[in-house]
Amino acid sequence: MFMTQLSGLIKRISEKEEFSIEDAGRLLAQGLISEGTIYMKGFGEMAVIETEATEGAETLQNVHRWTPSARLTEADRVLIASRFSDDPGALTLAKKLIDTGIPFAAISSKREETGIEELADAFIDLRLTQGILPDDEGGRTGFPSSIAGLYAYFLLKMTIEEIVNEYD
């Protein structure tokens, strides 16, 4: 049952976020094409996206983990990932980037409260606000935000590489 629900989630991301993934890919590819760096910051379990991008089997070129000491230039871009779009750490970073004029994309799930989706230059909604399986007490369990985030990241990575290859 978990596999069926997870497959449905992945399919929804693929179908409903196609244009957002393309927008985010173009935004981040601009940084690479203009010889900038893509910085990544994942909050909570979404730090797995940073690890995949910087240490995985197929790393994205010129990608680094964002740290508070990072010296960003106008050519740089940032990808922020969080479980929910109203994550306080993600919002704080987003506001700093806006104040310094650094374009950024975000990956997270929108909730009713407005959040990073209103601030980001490109936003990918994971569409995951509760567990995907019902439990015995009438609640929900199985919250695969990191799996959904990695799936969106891989779609984004392939989009970025395609854009950069076409430019070269």
Image (tube, rainbow, N blue to C red):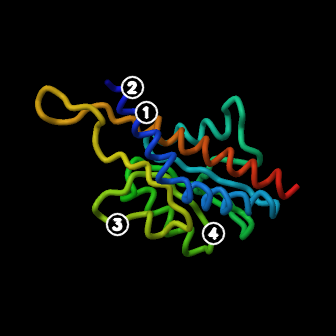
Q: Nearer the viewer, residue 100 or 140?
A: 140
Task: Pick whichever of labels 1 and 4 is earlier in the sequence.
Answer: 1
Q: CA distance from mark 4 to mark 3?
A: 21 Å
Which quarter of the rendered picture does the N terminus lie within? top left
Mark 4 sits on what residue?
102
For label 2, count other residues whose C-alpha is less than 10 Å away and answer few (under 14), some (14-19) or many (20+): few
Q: Nearer the viewer, residue 82 or 22?
A: 22
Q: What is the secondary structure assignment of the residue under circle 2?
A: helix
Circles 1, 2 touching at the beta carbon (< 8 Å): yes
User: What amino acid type is highlighted by mark number 2?
Assistant: Met
Q: Name which residue lies at 43% across and 48% down.
A: 126
Q: Mark on residue 76?
A: none
Task: Pick whichever of labels 2 and 4 is earlier in the sequence.
Answer: 2
Q: What is the secondary structure assignment of the residue under circle 3?
A: loop
Q: What is the secondary structure assignment of the residue under circle 4?
A: loop
Mark 3 sits on what residue?
114
Q: CA distance from mark 2 to mark 4?
A: 38 Å
Task: Pick whichever of labels 4 and 3 is earlier in the sequence.
Answer: 4
On the image, the x and y values in percent for residue 159 come to 68, 50
User: What amino acid type is highlighted by mark number 1?
Assistant: Ser
Q: Name which residue lies at 62% across and 48% down.
A: 156
Residue 74's place in the image compared with 17, above or below, is: below
Quarter of the view holding residue 24: bottom right
Q: CA distance from mark 1 to mark 3?
A: 27 Å
Q: Name which residue lies at 76% across and 45% down.
A: 61
Q: CA distance from mark 1 to mark 2?
A: 6 Å
On the image, the x and y values in percent for residue 167 come to 84, 58
Mark 2 sits on what residue?
3
Which quarter of the rendered picture does the C terminus lie within? bottom right
Task: Pick whichever of labels 1 and 3 is earlier in the sequence.
Answer: 1
Mark 1 sits on what residue?
7
Closest to the camera, between mark 2 and mark 3, is 2
